Amino acid sequence: MLEIKNLHARIAEDDTEILRGLDLAVKPGEVAAIMGPNGSGKSTLAYILAGKQDYEITKGSIIYNGQNLLEMDTHERAAAGLFLAFQYPLEIPGVPTMTFLRTAINSQRKQRGEDELMTPDFLRFVKEKAAALKIDMAMLKRPLNVGFSGGEKKRAEILQMALLEPKLCVLDETDSGLDIDALKVVSEGVNALRSPDRSVIVITHYQRLLDYIVPDSVHVLSKGRIIKSGDKSLALELENKGYTDIIEDAA
Amino acid sequence: MNIQTTRPRTEAETGFLALFDRLDLPGDNKVKTARSEAIAALAIHGLPTRRVEAWHYTDLRTMMHKALEPASRPDKAQAEIAIGNRNWLDDFFMLPIVNGHYIPELVDEIPEELIISALCDGESAFIDGSLDADNAINILNTAFATDGLSMIVDEDCSPDLTIGIAHVYSEDQPAMTATRNNIVVCDGASARFSERFVGPDNIEYHSNAVTNLWLGLNSKARWVICQEEGDQATHLGQLNVTLGEGAELDIYVINTGSKLVRCEINVIVAGEGSHLNIRGVNLVGDKSHVDVTTVLKHNVANTTSSQIFRNVSTEQGTGVFQGQIQVAQIAQKTDAAMACNTLLLSDECSFSAKPELEIFADDVLCAHGATIADLDENHLFYLMARGIPERDARNLLVKAFLEEVLEDLDDEALSDILIHRIDRWLDARQ
Ligand SMILES: Nc1ncnc2c1ncn2[C@@H]1O[C@H](COP(=O)(O)OP(=O)(O)OP(=O)(O)O)[C@@H](O)[C@H]1O
Ligand SMILES: [Mg+2]
């Protein structure tokens, strides 16, 4: 599904190197958790996967389903099934949420050579997915994310994911800002999408989310590199001991 | 102050004077006198340059290259073809003005609540307004107006009726049109007007339109200006309004056409308790120059006004917004707000915004703000990360920015049309 090799990336503006030789492979159907201290480069990795322009790749490669991801435009990556749930979803005044959802779905379908979704089908689809995530349709009448609470924004991200049915989901701290009930609802939403041909990368600081979305692999990111990988027990170990030992061992 | 007279005349200035001598324009003696005074004012002042303060950003003397012959009056069949399906909403009561001439033969039965006559029918009171150096639009219009509408809307007029005024240019050669409308909305009446300007691309025609609008006691009106002239046109428009006591007026203006636009809105807020709303969208692309200038005079106490303009400048477009608010000493409790927000989408475009407050009363609220920004790259990324191609994502954001001023328009059919105009303009870029 995804193979990242020796990835080096820096901020285009000021040449600060953030990723320093990152390796990561995610198989179809795999749920991979990425953990790591603040500022270690987790969101940077997520943004680079999605195609944000602020970073410059100086070395390494990313192969996604046999394609060179770095050569694809942001919207092409999305149409090819890559989805990033943002750590901080943006508020976009003036763009009605429903217009946005329909445009996104149909843009992707068009790029894939599929028929556009007609309005009644689209509405039915949104209603069904929103209900599963306990999202009030009234919220979707508002401009995109505008005035949504922190938790509502995260839920809206998962709704988008459910509607766009991606192949590779990257969840950047989707658990932060969610109350306990919402965490369950959102996790169920993610689990409902789990399938043998869909992979998920879960970026999180907390074991709590991984109790609900049980990972197949856990990776520790520190200073721009994966310094340790393991199974779900690695996350429990981190929860108990913190990062210090692992980082020292790797050094 | 004799500088102007020593300045050599431009081709356009000379042309206008010669044209006036040659033409025999309609009107009784009073009108003829007014026309002579106007042309005399033009001879003295010439067309305004940057040195005339109100024209600081739009040097009309340099930008208006020629004086054009008046366009000719079409016969009924020609007018019918020109109007074609330019009737933009079926339920409008449409008054066609083709090539500067009102075509009564194409008007459906006139509702009883309206009294309509053509200006050239000998109505003499139609020529007024100042002939000062900064009032070039009125000077040219007074001298050269060929026709227009006089309209009185009485209090029985249905508020659901929209009176459309369709200005259509249909000549295949450059010519000039100049029209003048005088409209009175009687005490207690309500009326909706939609004025639309259309014409062919690639023809450097001149369109000049002055409307004087009086709103009576407790009357209510909406005035929409949709300026979508051909891409090489020069459009000089002036809307002069007097608001009576308790009157409410909403003005919507959208500029999507022309190479050179000067759109003036002058409002005298003359009656206590009256309220004025202006919402504007200016789309400035190609090498066009669009200047919207508003002058509001709050002359009495307890009145409110609110203006919001949203502008998009791109390619080599230059845009201008000048908003002047004058509050007289007795006009206490005036509440006047003005906002002008602009998106600049290219390196070569520009936009100048100049708010100007002249406040002589002490107990007033006057807020004004102007912002200029580019599209937010992070917003763009968010949309693209959901699979929306860059161009579509940009257009979505531009529309979002513009539609915020149309939100107040409580009329879905009309707002759909205006949004369609925005779409069309966006689609025509690159
Ligand atoms: N566009 C940018 N401009 C400047 N610095 C940046 C930029 N993007 C990332 N950084 C820096 O790169 C480092 C990695 O940031 P990143 O957001 O990837 O960390 P993170 O692992 O997601 O942290 P957190 O757990 O706090 O979310 C940080 O030091 C951050 O300040
Ligand atoms: Mg982060």
Image: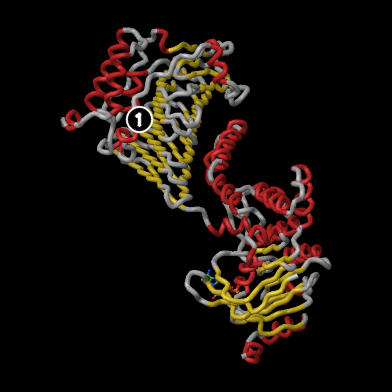
- Residue neighbourhood size for the residue with mark 1, other residues' Cα within 10 Å, grouped as few (<14), some (14–19), many (≥20): many
Q: Is mark 1 within 8 Å of ligand 1?
A: no
Left or right? Give the position of A77 relative to B240: right
Where is residue B359 shown, x and y percent of the image?
Answer: 31, 39
Where is residue A8 shown, x and y percent of the image?
Answer: 59, 77
Location of residue B334 (image quadrant): top left
Residue plotted at (59% across, 64% down):
A52
Up the image or down, B428 lies above or below B5; here it is below
Residue plotted at (63% across, 74% down):
A42
Residue plotted at (48% across, 43% down):
B310
**Residue picked out by circle 1:** B300
The colour scheme is secondary structure
Front residue of A97 and B60: B60
- State which quarter of the image contains the N terminus of chain B: top left
Residue A38 seen anywhere in this rendered image of the structure: no
Location of residue A222 (image quadrant): bottom right
Residue type (three-letter) at the residue carrying disc 1: Val
Element assignment for label 1: loop
Location of residue B91 (image quadrant): top right
Left or right? Give the position of A25 relative to B344: right
Residue plotted at (42% across, 13% down):
B119
The chain letter for the residue carrying disc 1 is: B
Front residue of B317 and B188: B317
Where is residue B367 shown, x and y percent of the image?
Answer: 40, 44
Up the image or down, B199 lies above or below B395; here it is above
Left or right? Give the position of A66 relative to A248: right
Residue B376 seen anywhere in this rendered image of the structure: yes
State the residue lying farthest toward the right. A196
Front residue of B233 and B36: B233
State the residue lying farthest toward the front. B173
Up the image or down, A52 lies above or below A38; here it is above
